[in-house]
């Protein structure tokens, strides 16, 4: 008995110790989250510091609590474009802000329309007589686009700035499929519907090449025009015409070459840059515990600045529903456009006395079923006599255009990619692959559809014909929906459809878009349609309540951002190469997944998952992605 009592006491002690440990961990998490949470009102007169250590997106994705708990090292972040724009415009009119600083040392990128709109907000700050300074070890295209609007663009002596322009290579898998004798059953409508070509060809078709040349050409023209307007001394053509000669002219020193081409203004390290900012903003008077490497100049961070300037909810309500990312079935998102989730948000908010609704789209499309579910939910707003205005961001193509059709007025920007009116389905089968290993199929059918589709024994002509007919029928419905919305016949729409992608300006010319303008323009027009007149109104976003536990973990993770590695030229190139590999994996995994009929635009495929850039070698590494691509894990 004495031994048993000792064992029991030991077990109780272990239990109490574990309970105490978990309590300490819990309260430590709470304290750290509260400490990391921005406190309203703690604005320090001086600089507004925007440390963009991640990517700029339309809508932040939902954090995965398990991934956050398992994360090792610093992770990159997502910044909503509208938050950055609002922060800059607030800074333009606030006397407490003397200078705006953009730290792009760990900037992973954004798409053209977002950066264009942020650039316009930077211009407002400068028009208010306030300098805007940027710093990075290396600037790529998107960083150069932001820095072009700055009054002073700094680069580290070991770094540089470079512009590659839109475009690049796509991966084609026909040779891989042939090698392993995988059958790709493709059903599509649209001469230009190139999303399936990687599984059928080893190169681009002439039609796909023509489509890509038109879209990328328009984006490149818009990019160069913006740089020329914001920074007339920048010599983009000199750099891109002969990059090697450009660098050699400065003795191989990319920083000097970047300055000579007018891409940056000053060369100096982080210490030099901080001293320059301190001359304008003054020295900080706030103690920053645990921030030994915090800049010595007086500054306020983005999160604190936004918390100190909450959005005012005055006057009439203009609803905004965001359709960002690939459109998929189910409740996915935010950051991915789950059809069920968005339809639910719309249905729940329909009776909340909104004067109008703006549909903000930044999507390359996806599931036809999910797109139609969202369209029907929007149609119910129209039936309730609530005006609907559409605002297109970087892309609103294929399924992204499908969901735009309930709009009474469609706004786009010159850099918007839209159209891609076409559908397809891809299903793989492995009968020839298995046959090489001695596996064959045989059986008894009562009809031509019995046991179909058979992924291991092959497809019958009957199921092939039915699937193609289904896709053709879906395309016909797509044409009908667009024709009704745009006041055209299905035949007229078919002439500009066939899967073809259009830049914003061309889309307006052919009648797919009504007007050039950004989100603010769309909101103002919606208020007008809603009968607000000269009265006050505000935008109210339709979104789910944030997950408090994920927010807590994100707050903890945000404290590690200063530990993240800054990118030099080679590091930035290597990081983007990894992201390109990630895109290839995503495409092959999408093919192998059962996804139904798709209205998806390959030309405007979503930007890579930049969050993998901050991972240690392992799940997100190039070798791991290559292994997944080849089916080794």
Image (spheres, rainbow, N blue to C red):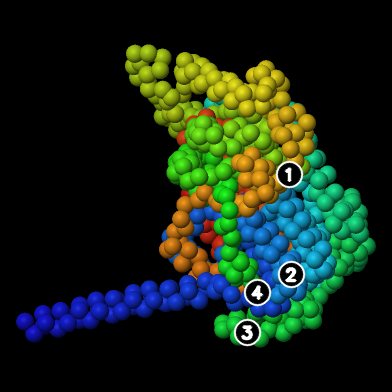
Q: Position of residue 65 (x, y in %)?
A: 44, 60
Q: Residues within 10 Å of mark 1 (few under 14, many from 20)?
A: some
- Disc number placed over residue 286 in the picture, else none: 3
Q: Nearer the viewer, mark 1 or mark 2?
A: 1
Of labels 2 and 3, earlier in sequence is 2
Which sits in the foreground, 516 or 3? 516
Q: Is residue 217 visible?
A: yes
Image side of residue 425 versus residue 517, left or right: left
Residue at far top of view: 447
Whole-number angstrom distance, CA of label 4 to CA of label 2 = 10 Å
Q: Residue at x 66, y 45 (%)?
A: 533
Identify the element where label 4 is drawn.
strand
Q: Position of residue 369 (x, y in %)?
A: 49, 32
Whole-number angstrom distance, CA of label 3 to CA of label 4 = 10 Å
Identify the element where label 3 is drawn.
loop
Identify the element where label 2 is drawn.
strand
Q: Which residue is mark 2?
A: 100
Number of numbered labels in the structure image: 4
Whole-number angstrom distance, CA of label 2 to CA of label 3 = 18 Å
Q: Which residue is mark 4?
A: 300
- Disc number placed over residue 517 in the picture, else none: 1
Q: Residue 251 lies in what quarter of the image?
A: bottom right
Whole-number angstrom distance, CA of label 3 to CA of label 1 = 42 Å
Determine whether 382 is above or below 147 in the image. above
Q: Residues within 10 Å of mark 3 (few under 14, many from 20)?
A: few
């Amino acid at each position: 008995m004495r031994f048993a009592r000792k064992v029991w006491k030991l077990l109780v002690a272990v239990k109490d110790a574990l309970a105490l440990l978990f309590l300490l961990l819990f309260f430590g998490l709470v304290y750290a989250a509260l400490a990391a949470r921005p406190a309203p009102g703690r604005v320090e007169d001086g600089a507004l510091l925007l440390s963009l250590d991640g990517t700029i997106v339309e809508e932040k994705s939902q954090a995965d609590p398990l991934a956050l708990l398992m994360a090792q090292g610093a992770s990159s972040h997502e910044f909503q474009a509208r938050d950055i724009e609002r922060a800059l415009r607030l800074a333009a009119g606030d006397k407490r802000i003397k200078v705006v600083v953009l730290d792009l040392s760990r900037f992973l990128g954004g798409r053209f329309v977002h950066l264009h709109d942020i650039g316009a907000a930077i211009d407002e700050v400068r028009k208010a007589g306030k300098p805007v300074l940027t710093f990075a070890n290396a600037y790529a295209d998107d960083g150069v686009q932001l820095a072009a609007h700055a009054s002073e663009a700094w680069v580290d002596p070991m770094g540089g700035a470079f512009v590659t322009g839109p475009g690049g290579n796509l991966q084609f898998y026909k040779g891989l499929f042939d090698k392993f004798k995988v059958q790709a059953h493709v059903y599509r409508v649209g001469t230009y519907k190139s999303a399936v070509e990687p599984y059928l060809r080893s190169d681009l078709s002439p039609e796909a090449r023509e489509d890509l040349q038109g879209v990328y050409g328009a984006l490149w023209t818009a990019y160069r025009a913006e740089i020329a307007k914001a920074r007339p001394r920048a010599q983009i053509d000199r750099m891109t015409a002969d990059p090697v000669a450009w660098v050699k002219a400065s003795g191989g020193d990319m920083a000097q070459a970047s300055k000579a081409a007018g891409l940056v203004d000053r060369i100096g390290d982080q210490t030099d840059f901080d001293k320059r900012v301190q001359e304008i903003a003054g020295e900080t008077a706030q103690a920053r515990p645990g921030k030994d490497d915090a800049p010595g100049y007086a500054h306020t961070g983005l999160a604190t600045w936004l918390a100190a300037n909450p959005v005012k909810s005055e006057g009439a309500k203009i609803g905004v529903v965001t359709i960002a990312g690939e459109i998929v079935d189910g409740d996915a998102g935010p950051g991915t456009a789950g059809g069920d989730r968005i339809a639910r948000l719309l249905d729940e908010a329909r009776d909340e006395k909104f004067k109008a609704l703006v549909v903000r789209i930044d999507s390359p499309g996806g599931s036809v079923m999910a797109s139609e579910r969202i369209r029907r939910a929007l149609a119910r707003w129209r039936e309730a006599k609530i005006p609907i205005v559409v605002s297109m961001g970087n892309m609103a193509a294929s399924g992204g255009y499908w969901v735009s059709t309930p709009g009474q007025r469609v706004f786009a920007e010159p850099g918007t990619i839209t159209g891609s009116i076409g559908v397809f389905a891809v299903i793989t089968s492995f009968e020839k692959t298995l046959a090489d290993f001695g596996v064959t199929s045989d059986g008894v059918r009562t009809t031509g559809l019995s046991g179909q589709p058979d992924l291991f024994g092959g497809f019958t002509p009957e199921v092939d014909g039915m699937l193609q007919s289904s896709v053709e029928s879906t395309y016909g419905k797509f044409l009908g929906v667009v024709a009704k919305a745009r006041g055209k016949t299905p035949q007229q729409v078919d002439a500009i459809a066939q899967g073809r992608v259009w830049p914003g300006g061309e889309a307006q010319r052919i009648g797919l878009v009504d007007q050039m303008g950004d989100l603010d323009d769309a909101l103002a027009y919606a208020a007008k349609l809603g009968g607000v007149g000269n009265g006050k109104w505000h935008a109210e976003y339709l979104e789910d309540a944030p997950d408090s536990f994920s927010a807590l973990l994100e707050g903890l993770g945000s404290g590690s951002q200063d530990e993240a590695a800054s990118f030099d030229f080679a590091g930035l190139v290597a990081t983007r190469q990894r992201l390109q590999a990630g895109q290839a994996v995503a495409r092959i995994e999408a093919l192998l997944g059962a996804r139904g009929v798709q209205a998806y635009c390959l030309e405007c495929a979503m930007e890579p998952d930049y969050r993998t850039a901050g991972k240690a070698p392992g799940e997100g590494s190039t070798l791991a992605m290559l292994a997944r691509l080849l089916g080794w894990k």
